[in-house]
Image (cartoon, rainbow, N blue to C red):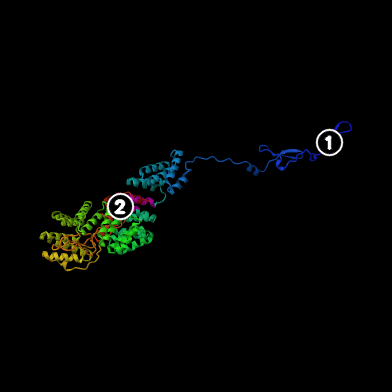
Amino acid sequence: MNNNGLGGSMVILLPERLDPSRKVETPNQQAMNPLSETPESHVNGMTTPARPPSAALKAKIRPKKAPELQTIERRNWLIHLHYVRKEFELCKQLIREQLDETRGMCEYANYVQGLILRQEGKIQESFELFQLCNILNPSSIENIKQMARALFLLGRHKLAVEAYIQAENKCDKADWEIHHNLGVCYMHLKEYDNAREQLIFALEQNKHHQTFAMLAKLYLLENDVASSINTYRAAIEYFPENADLHTTLGLLFMQTGKHQQAFEHLGTALTFDPNNTRALIAAGSMMQSHQDFDVALAKYRVAAQSIPESPPLWNNIAMCFFGKKKYVAAISCLKRANYLAPFDWKILYNLGLVHLTMQQYTSAFHFLSAAVNLRPTKGHIFMLLAISLTYLDDEENARQAYEQAVSLESRDPSVCLNYAVFLHNHDDAEGARRMINEFEARVVRFRQATGADLDTEVMEIGAKLAAILGVSGSVFQKSSGRTMLEAEDETVLPSEKLIITKDADQDAGETPQETDGTSNPTENSTLLVPSTHNPELHNPPAETSEALDQEATPLASEQEEQDPDSPQIPPEDSQENDEADKKYEDEDLV
């Protein structure tokens, strides 16, 4: 602004771009329309709102976050993850949270909780949860199958059968698992025909090794060993690398006296599973029965790494030492076995046998008395008991024990011979002749059954006593060398070994000696010759010991009457009494 000549002020207007007071705005400082205002454009002096493209609008407008829905199944994946990892504590915590949120209406949470409770042994609580799952989802077949399995474990087999039939009716196609489990339930109900039908139908649907094993077990319960062996052979064709199938088949061959085939299958089992304890102990027992104690001990050493507290294993080890005439070591191992299994009659029998061999007759009587109380149906125990009573000068009780032994053991000729020796030494010539005649009859039956002869020493003792008593028999004219005799089946005595005491003319304090033979557990007697000793054995059990040996493990009946120093194999899958059929094992079901 300047003063002009008129005395007034003059205003000079400069262009906006030349105005020194004008502030130049940078692009960042230019005013922008707020988001709430619509931008405008000026065209030809007219103002119109400008609309951005639709893509720009979508970029500016952010979608709202979806609300979290409290679904009752939203933690199922996490519950499943912890369950398969066996992290049961975390799994149960998640289940509690899930059930609290859903007020107990989550089917999967209840289902998994039922599985966990069953593994913890709470079968009834598990069954109740599966019932709840079935109420929540009546169309689920798995819920019904789990209910049936819980009923089976509770021993309610009829209800389990009904549940499985209900599940079968709901299935669109045949389910081999349902038919397998139905067969197992029928087995426990003693309905063997229905069980066989269901198991065979299950095999038609799916060739599963458990179904083969259960079908073979069913044949054993029916005393059909040949069909059981054929079933295991068929199973091995489908599962040639299954060590358990080879082991069980080998045990069945041992039971039937086919030791070569048994050894082949046991060797195959050890090839696929070198640490299979059943196969190791079975193979060791076969070595031990052939007097190869060092090889047997090597097998037992490997097995002891897996089952160091197995009473039958220590019994077998003890009998190896007994065969090597290391009696103190044998007693030490037997005492350990007796500590682990105080009610095993075979361990007590062997303890009595070893003490009798060491001329410790009082200790022998103590253990044999305990054995006879546990197994009053074994004639050989009464025979050893009679021998110990004879040395303890208890003639009356010894005579009663011999009478009981003869009545209980109807196949072993040595029982009659030992009793005849006892009667002869106590001036009962008539009774001695009667026992010698019975001995001859049993020898004839034994030869007809096995095609072999008794031990030479046994026949010599019988011939000597028969000559003294004036009895002439043709059986004493044939006497063969000592051979290992093997029975064709359980009903035939494999080989007889006789335990007799010293002659009357010999000093009673003379140490008895062992003869080299292979036979059943027979006992020391008192009069004519040095005694021989045959300990009791256990062998690895087959699938059902009840059908093979009602007294012990499946192979025990053969070896306990066959091999002098044969081992006792851990009866892990066998039972010693008739309640074995009533044991409800979860492994039977699939």
For mark 1, give the secondary structure: loop
**One can see residue 442 in this view:** yes
Rendered-image quadrant of the N terminus = top right
**Main SS type for the magenta part?**
helix
Question: Is residue 177 highlighted in magenta?
Answer: yes
The amino acid marked with disc number 1 is Ile
| Direction right: furthest residue | 5
Quarter assignment of residue 239: bottom left
Magenta residues span 176-198
For mark 2, give the secondary structure: helix
Residue that carries the numbered disc 2 in the rendered image: 192
**One can see residue 139 in this view:** no
Quarter assignment of residue 536: bottom left
Quarter assignment of residue 298: bottom left
Q: Which mark is residue 12?
A: 1
Residue 465 position in % (x across, y down): 14, 64
Q: CA distance from mark 2 to mark 1?
A: 125 Å
Residue 388 position in % (x across, y down): 18, 56
Crowdedness of circle 1 by 10 Å Cα count: few (<14), some, many (20+)? Answer: few
Q: Residue at x 47, y 43 (%)?
A: 73
Residue 345 position in % (x across, y down): 24, 53
How many marks can you see? 2
